[in-house]
Amino acid sequence: MTAPKSLAAAKKEPLVGGWYRLLEDYGSGVGALQAERIDPTDADRQRRAPLCVQVVDLVEPGTPGVGAADHTTPLVQWVDRAPSGRYTCHLIQFPAARFAELFALAKEPPEWAAYVEQVSSPAPAGGD
């Protein structure tokens, strides 16, 4: 099986709504992102799965708030599972050139459907 090509190597740009997988670990410490992690859909927490993100927006330079940078930044989201079993959504942004080096094309991960179903349903009793 051939390793996936980064967007930079494939000469592709990230698209809003597109799914991408992280090719290598990014960052260090508490906020680090791991390219492979425990599969959020595995109740036994044994199976590993790639970290897949969806591009929410391509934020232009100088946009107030998250776009306060001098370059375009893909704003991405991904889903993980909390110890309680509830799915949580996270957001992060990357400089476009770095995003293109770190990510490759991917398919929608199975945890996304579980997250959408969770947020479409009424919250459980107890104010979770």
Image (spheres, helix red, strand yellow):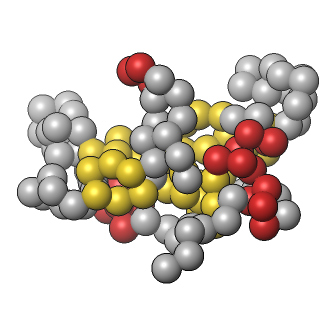
Q: Is residue 26 left or right of residue 57?
A: left
Residue at left offset 63%, top offset 53%: 103
Percent x, y of residue 81: 27, 45
The correct choice, above or below, for 4 with respect to 97 in the image is below
Q: Is residue 56 left or right of residue 78?
A: right
For residue 125, which quarter of the picture?
Answer: top left
> Is residue 97 visible in the rendered structure shown here?
yes
Q: Quadrant of the C terminus?
A: top left
Residue 9: % across, % down: 78, 61
Relative image position of residue 3 (x, y in whole percent): 56, 68
Which quarter of the figure has residue 16? bottom right
Residue under the point 17% across and 46% down: 85
| Near-viewer residue (10 or 125) | 10
Residue 17 in sight in this render: no
Could you tell whether 17 is left or right of 42 in the image?
A: right
| Nearer to the camera, 39 or 128 | 39
As drawn, is 35 to the left or to the right of 91? Answer: left
Residue drawn 41% across the image and 20% down it:
29
Q: Position of residue 92 (x, y in %)?
A: 59, 34
